[in-house]
Image: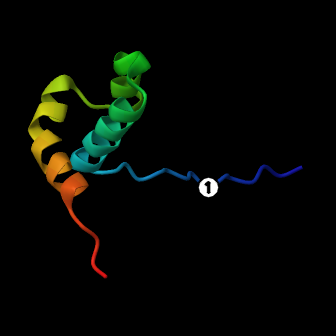
Amino acid sequence: MIPIASKSHTVPQLPLRHRAWIALYSIANSPVNRAEILRINNVTETDLAEYEESWRRMRRRVPPG
């Protein structure tokens, strides 16, 4: 049997801003394990602080229509 090289599939990582927003939403909706949310999203408390204001503005935005 001839081995077939498998294709390496990599998942593109979201930008830091998006990962921070996701973490902020997760913490707002389920603050049970903040450290785990930070770990899963690969962000730090400093990252959250940097993007928190833009996340708050986004949440206040009224959709068109």
Name the spot of residue 49 as percent of width and height, x first.
Answer: 12, 32
In depth, the one of 9 and 37 nearer the eye is: 37
Q: Residue at x 26, y 40 (%)?
A: 20
Residue 54: percent from left, percent from top: 13, 50
For the residue carrying disc 1, how many other residues have a C-alpha within 10 Å: few (<14), some (14-19), or many (20+)? few
Percent of width and height locating residue 62: 24, 67
Question: Residue 4: x and y, percent?
Answer: 75, 54
Quadrant for the C terminus in the image: bottom left
- With 34 as the anchor, is 11 left or right in this view? right
Residue sitting at 20 percent across and 55 percent down? Answer: 60
Residue extending furthest bottom?
A: 65
Q: Secondary structure at mark 1?
A: loop
- What colouring style does the render use? rainbow
Q: Residue 5 vs residue 38: left or right?
A: right
Q: Residue at left 34%, top 50%?
A: 14
Pick out the residue farthest to the right. 1
Q: Is residue 49 above or below residue 6?
A: above
Q: How many marks?
A: 1
Q: Which residue is mark 1?
A: 7
Residue at coordinates 35% horizontally, 17% vertically from top-left?
35
Given residues 28 and 40, the one toward you in this image is 28
Q: Quadrant of residue 34?
A: top left
Q: Looking at numbered disc 1 in the image, what kind of residue is underneath it?
A: Lys
